[in-house]
Amino acid sequence: MSSAAKSTPGEGQGEATVQIERKREVKRIRRSADEARRLILDAAEERLAAQGPEGIRLQDIARDVGISHPAILHHFESREGLVRALIARTSTQLRDKMLTALQSKHNGEDVVEANELISNVFETLSDRGTARLLSWMLLTGRSPENSTSGALVTEIADELHLRRKEDAAKNAKAAPEREDTLFMAILTANAAFGDAIIGRELAAEAGLDQAGVARFRAWFAKLLHDHAGDVNKS
Amino acid sequence: MSSAAKSTPGEGQGEATVQIERKREVKRIRRSADEARRLILDAAEERLAAQGPEGIRLQDIARDVGISHPAILHHFESREGLVRALIARTSTQLRDKMLTALQSKHNGEDVVEANELISNVFETLSDRGTARLLSWMLLTGRSPENSTSGALVTEIADELHLRRKEDAAKNAKAAPEREDTLFMAILTANAAFGDAIIGRELAAEAGLDQAGVARFRAWFAKLLHDHAGDVNKS
DNA sequence: GTACATACTGACACGGTTGTCAATAGTAAT
DNA sequence: ATTACTATTGACAACCGTGTCAGTATGTAC
């Protein structure tokens, strides 16, 4: 009835993210500090996404990686340290993804692709793991002024606003209000976040299949797009 | 250094929900089972909202209420039982609030108040405690098919759709698509939920004060309102 | 090869939390 | 008053997760 019997229960369906190194009986595997930290964070992230906050237990994570739990303490001095590191990594990852999503459309192509940009942002933000991590972080009240999303929303709003102004100038329309653009960004963030958390249940309840969800996102993008147009018209 | 010394630390700012009965040295207070359950659930809810998932500890909650923790076990057989009861209660409360929010506008007054209705729904859903509880519930993977929000979204969408059709008929406009209405409901739910969780941080980051937040909600309501109009026009 | 730094381990200590149990004390009915 | 019922309690037991420690093994520099 001990705990040793059930090793890593039902963890087989995971991605290839966590390279489970089968520990040979005697040979001890020695990784570089960075590598070890990466593996540990990967495992922790997976646990968190799969089981929620209470899924982050040093022993479990250690088992996932194939090390002993003191090794984790060695790399991140404490559980809290691990959590902070995880938050920090996820935050910067999110930030990077967001910024690239922004850049990608500004180089070539038209400028009018703002709605497609919105879609990108939505997709990125509504990533299950990320949103779960972030929301759990907020729920437990960590990182009040952290680099969480930094001044991300503001940056995005600025970027968006820039394009709207360009677009307005090009078509000889009145320039949109700044706050209007900001609100669009905030709405997108809120909606994406909510989608990541309750989207699944909501869709199931409403009888939406995957195609339906896709239609919803397209609908949302169009909604914002139309709004961006209408504001200038009237 | 026992626990009796520091009774109910820093809980003074709370509402009048939890009637803290100062336990006289010897007199033992005896409540009815229902009353006790209610008090315990209130305290648990407050803890959860204030400190997140890990804030639900039997001893703490017991201290808040002014009882000993075995009393909690007596009323809800286990911690898990308490959690389930809390979820159940919050769910039905949410449901009730939603339905009343719906009814209130359908009786008297005009029918066009759909956007105000949306505002109501938004406000209700974005209640901090409720959303936190729900999201934590989802995060920890409880109640997959529960009465969580039941067929709530569907119901609301139906109700909304009904009014839109009435409105369309009255103004001799084309009837809107059903899915369009559903999407409006889903977007509202997502946005309200996201707002409840990251809204505060988002607003702070964007430099929005309370008035700004209010403007955002109004903006959102108007966005949906305009959309409802536009769909018919074109 | 030898020495050094450090990733890693097993065993254990510690604190905190849930849950059990026998006993106590309000409350209502007879 | 006596009785029956049960809300409530203090003390205790069992468990679990974090963190410590002294020691081991592996890679690297010389």
Image (cartoon, coloured by chain):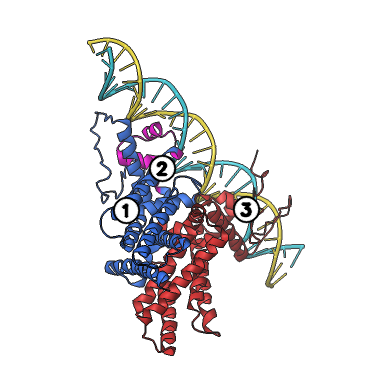
Chain colours: A blue, B red, C yellow, D cyan
Q: In the depicted view, which residue is nearer to us: A182 or B176? A: A182
Q: Which mark is residue B64?
A: 3
Q: Which residues are magenta?
A: A55-80
- C13 above or below B38? above
Residues packed near mark 1 inside 10 Å, few (<14), some (14 to 19) or many (20 plus): some
- Residue B147 seen in this snapshot: no
The mark closer to the camera, 1 or 2, is 1
Q: Is A182 rendered above or below residue D20?
A: below
Figure check: A131 above or below A71: below
| Mark 3, secondary structure of its residue | helix
Question: Same chain for marks 1 and 2?
Answer: yes
Q: Amino acid at mark 1?
A: Ala
**Disc 1 or 2, which lies upstream in sequence?**
2
Would you say residue A78 is visible in this rendering?
yes
Image x and y of residue C17, in percent: 52, 47
Is B48 a magenta residue?
A: no
> Residue A59 lies in magenta, yes or no?
yes
Dot label at residue A101: 1
Q: Secondary structure at mark 2?
A: helix
On residue B91, which mark appears? none
Do marks 2 and 3 both belong to one polypeptide chain?
no
Marks 2 and 3: which is nearer the front?
A: 2
